[in-house]
Image: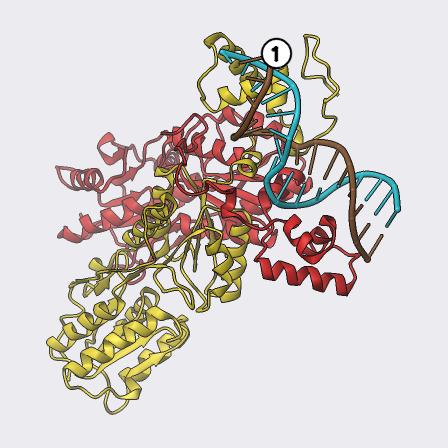
Chain colours: A red, B yellow, C cyan, D brown
Amino acid sequence: MTDRTGRRNVPDTHRRSESRYGNRPTMKDVAARAGVGLKTVSRVVNGEPGVTPETERRVQEAIDALGFRRNDSARVLRKGRTASIGLVLEDLADPFYGPLSRAVEEVARAHGALLINGSSAEDPEREQELVLALCARRVDGLVVIPAGDDHRYLEPELKAGVATVFVDRPAGQIDADVVLSDNYGGARDGVAHLIAHGHRRIGFIGDMPRIHTAAERLRGYRAAMEDAGIAVADAWMSLGVTDPERVRRAAREMLSGPDPVTAIFTGNNRVTVTVIRVLAEQTRPVALVGFDDIELADLLQPGVTVVAQDSAALGRTAAERLFRQLDGTLPRPERIELPTRLVTRGSGELPPAD
Amino acid sequence: MTDRTGRRNVPDTHRRSESRYGNRPTMKDVAARAGVGLKTVSRVVNGEPGVTPETERRVQEAIDALGFRRNDSARVLRKGRTASIGLVLEDLADPFYGPLSRAVEEVARAHGALLINGSSAEDPEREQELVLALCARRVDGLVVIPAGDDHRYLEPELKAGVATVFVDRPAGQIDADVVLSDNYGGARDGVAHLIAHGHRRIGFIGDMPRIHTAAERLRGYRAAMEDAGIAVADAWMSLGVTDPERVRRAAREMLSGPDPVTAIFTGNNRVTVTVIRVLAEQTRPVALVGFDDIELADLLQPGVTVVAQDSAALGRTAAERLFRQLDGTLPRPERIELPTRLVTRGSGELPPAD
DNA sequence: TTGAAAGCGCTAACAG
DNA sequence: CTGTTAGCGCTTTCAA
């Protein structure tokens, strides 16, 4: 059972009847043992100047003997900075987010901060719940890959000075820093690549258009088609949840019937993987370009041509911006767009089969 | 400077001039605004009983108006539990750890806890640094994928009641809960599989034996070979850092010379991927079984046979054990071993080429 | 049903 | 160089 701030509400009758923290020594204990004042211990622990080597030694001895470890909760309460930042993303298990998360972590580490992660599972409510829980911990900053499209709930936090950067998708209804890939341009380039190789009936399988990246990629697809003077048939497009079953069905439908597509543009890595499986069952070759790179794409037959985005760069850029916000060296919110890269490996260069 | 306490004749002797947290409202502010006592606000915020609906409404109104968010640092300081756990692993960007981390997060979430991640980059010092930083934050528990092999530095923490579970590799020099894959058995089965398909000269490319999993897999390899009465030549084994360059060289060496191996057993996912690339350049077919599953393994030609471990299950099991430690429902440290699964896809069933 | 007072363990500010 | 005092914002205790 959780209350409205998403916290545990369990009676903790077990354990800790004695003291909190299972009876950990405090600075006072260390001071007593070393026969010095509290503040002197604080100085030693924090490496502040103004302590005789001899005194320092005595204090250090007491620290080691007692197994003392400074309680950062108390420190935070006093100082107001937690030296931790929060990262809310869709799913840590997705290979797209691993490198992103790692990149954020590295930047945080360089600034002496720890990283708290949360997966929203693409659920706006869960995103909000996570973000607010992080704010309650008073993280210094927040990197958010939005699941929802209304972030007004963050207004008090922003006003209170919580540094915030949105990544991969823009914030909804509030003015904040955003770091994105050029989803529109990347998709347009990818589709134009297929067109350049002679395709005209090109399918698009992507996520629900309420997701910003999905909408942008769809827009890129439409633009490339329009640039080439091709009228897009409804039957060529599939927009919705990208679970394997649905994607498989969509791909098969596009590939059958009287006027099948000769190429498919896939809207994200999960879709690409599923479509590769479908294409493997086809008798005639079908061209494929996918958004997002996938591992081992070069070893498949044919190699998979992709529009690659640099997820680590997204994370790094966002995190660096976050810490510049905290430094106060950042004037006002900006929208940064990172380029994508077309990686040709074979599947996107197949000629139309008809 | 605004007086946010407003109305009523509340003595404003305690007004905070400028505060940390960028001037966030506190319970005191809310209390003043709602014209109630501090404790009443606390009751409302925590959903405690004993507040009139009317009072509750007034308080809630003040909370919303002020954008109040409880400061968990202060709460933690008082209560002693942080409702957060730490996870230290090697590299979040590694596809093996993504699902593991996500699984830990899910269990944590079910217990109302947040997850703080850190990557050790396989560096024992960094592991210790991270773990101690997490302890300073007073995380309730710790899931650690060890980089080092001496964890005595954790003794004071364990004594102080920090729940701890080691995953993937055992703890060094201390008695603690451990959740492992059956690395020995898995490797033995994988190599036996190759032997069953007629191979006798089988190569092994794995990580430094100081890493427990690497040593165990090597042991499995040796056992399978010995079971089959095959004497292992030194030239068939490569143990060390698994960067692509070194692995590539090692593989090529095994595959050349007067007495080349006809099959290779690879010690982890990164090695497997590199070796697949090397095998792709070979003229004659070489059999391959890899430890760890890899994405798209089924779509390669031939499909890659692997000894799969369930990284999500490792994470889930560890996290569940952690929370049972916190419940106090766990008697004493145990060592849990999860089975691996041989997934045959073609590469492991190729006959010897000589 | 409500609230005042006393800390949790630490650091800031100021004395010695 | 060292120590004392006063909080940080919250929960606990106990009294009204």
Q: Quadrant of residue B30?
A: top right
Query: In the figure, A87 relative to B11: above or below?
Result: below
Badge 1: how crowded within 10 Å, few (<14), some, or many (20+)? some
Q: Outermost residue, bottom direction?
A: B258
Q: Relative to residue A330, is residue A251 drawn left or right? A: left
Query: In the figure, B200 relative to A317: above or below?
Result: below
Q: Quadrant of residue A297?
A: bottom left
Q: Which residue is disc 1 drawn over? A: B35
Q: Residue at 21% of width from left, 32% of height from top?
A: A235
Q: Residue at 73% of width from left, 17% of height from top?
A: B12
Q: Residue at 71% of width from left, 64% of height from top?
A: A57
In this orientation, which residue lies closer to the viewer: B302 or B287? Answer: B287
In this orientation, which residue lies closer to the viewer: A210 or A256? Answer: A210
In this orientation, which residue lies closer to the viewer: B165 or A192? Answer: B165
In this orientation, which residue lies closer to the viewer: A344 or A213? Answer: A213
- Residue B84: percent from left, percent from top: 46, 43
Identity of the amino acid at label 1? Answer: Gly
- Residue B139: percent from left, percent from top: 48, 46
- Residue A339: percent from left, percent from top: 49, 47
Q: Tell me the subunit letter for badge 1.
A: B
- Residue B76: percent from left, percent from top: 53, 37
Q: Residue at 77% of width from left, 56% of height from top?
A: A49
Element under disc 1: loop
Q: Quadrant of the C terminus of chain B?
A: bottom left
Q: Is residue B24 shown to the viewer in this render?
A: yes
